[in-house]
Image (spheres, rainbow, N blue to C red):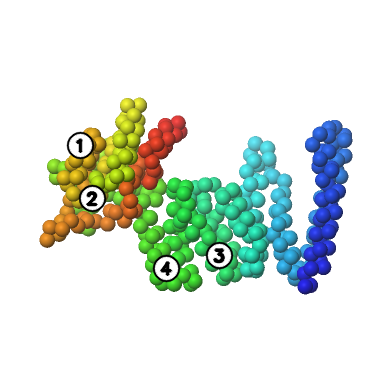
Amino acid sequence: SKENPPFYEYLNFITEMQKQVTPIRKQLETAQGDAKKDLQVKAQEIDEKVKAYRTNFLSKNADKFFSKIIMATTEVEIPEAPLDSTGNPDKNFSYLFYKKHFWDNIDFSDERMLRTPIFFSKMDQYLEKLTAKHPDSINISADILVKNARANEVVFQYVVSYITSTYERSKIMGMDAVFVHMVEKYYITNQCNWVDSTELVKIADRAQKIAPNLIGRKAAEFYDFYGRPFMQDTLGIVHTLNEINADYTVLVFFGPTCGHCKKEMPKIKHDVDSLIAAGYDIKTFAVATEFDKKEWKKFINDQKIGDWINVADINHDAEGNPVASSDWRDKYDIYSTPVIYLLDKEKKIIAKRISHTQIVEILSRLAKI
């Protein structure tokens, strides 16, 4: 292969330079004064020699794939930070410059880069370490990455698929917003031609179900298909989320005959009561997901949750069969129970699918802000 001779030539040179600089760096760990300065100069000279050799090598071997790998592993050089309004170096300059130019040395047009560990490592570093762990920030970084990836169809497919599946499976609360963003921006706009129509419907349907209950969005009110409230308590009185006047609302979905719910409900009740005793203004809106009114009443009594707002979707068709008044199960993504949402005063979602202990942790953290 024409790649091999220059490849080994480069590796031999780098290995030799490593041999020379390693003892110098070791001595620098304990050196002081002039001795330290001399060692720093020597290390700098070797570094400059490596840079010069690399530049020359890349110039002579621009047509070789190995040169692209060398470029990809070459860190962006950050210039000296400009002075801010106080006359001091701008503290954010290095980070912002580095992130902005992070992809400068990657050739997105060459799909062979995907077969190296470098590309995945860079992508992971960019999304997980250089980007703030907030969906909005990740969405911006994801879009920049996808824009670069458009240089090659295969690279574009890999990047879009990787980001979408990664954040769909993320265990970090709120990161499903990235999945929804990717689906809405790239999938349902027909930019992902590698996905067949059946799979596209599944992906779009999943995003559509998640979208209404993303963190920060207002919790969906329980209205029927005609816009009327329908959740009733055991006396047939209709209740809504918006009628609740409290700093926080714990929204709980449970099944009266669900064994896991019977184990978890006392823990939820205990922690909510403890928070109320500690001065937190909290109301609990508990939604029964089953239609058996007798079992529902029994559950309320057995669990001693009569002080909660206990409601259920009590609705039947013309033949007397239970029927849902709306698609509230889809809106809240209820496929198992119990499920807990935590809402703020405006009924915006603070947290979702959390445990009873997380209610305490989250409210304690918010109290310190």
Residue type indicated by callout 1: Asn
Find numbered disc 4 in the image and state the secondary structure of the residue it sits on.
Answer: helix
State if disc 4 and disc 3 touch (CB < 8 Å).
no
Q: Is residue 61 above or below residue 210?
A: below
Q: Which residue lies under the disc numbered 1?
A: 301
Residue type indicated by callout 2: Glu
Asked if residue 49 can be seen in this view, the reply is no
Find numbered disc 2 in the image and state the secondary structure of the residue it sits on.
Answer: loop
Work out how far the residue at label 1 is from the one at label 4, CA to CA, in angstroms.
45 Å
- Residue at left offset 65%, top offset 59%: 117
Is the C terminus in the top left, top right, bottom left or bottom right quadrant? Answer: top left
Q: Which residue lies under the disc numbered 4?
A: 199
Q: Nearer the viewer, mark 1 or mark 4?
A: 1
Q: Which mark is residue 7?
A: none
Work out how far the residue at label 3 is from the one at label 4, CA to CA, in angstroms.
17 Å
Decide which of tag 2 and tag 1 comes sooner along the chain: 2
Q: Which residue lies under the disc numbered 3?
A: 158
Residue type indicated by callout 3: Tyr
State if disc 4 and disc 2 touch (CB < 8 Å).
no
| Image side of residue 294 versus residue 12, left or right | left
Q: Position of residue 195 (x, y in %)?
A: 46, 70
Work out how far the residue at label 2 is from the one at label 4, CA to CA, in angstroms.
31 Å
Q: Is residue 132 above or below residue 114?
A: above
- Residue at left offset 81%, top offset 34%: 30
Q: Furthest-left residue in view?
A: 319
Decide which of tag 3 and tag 4 comes sooner along the chain: 3
Q: Which residue lies under the disc numbered 2?
A: 290
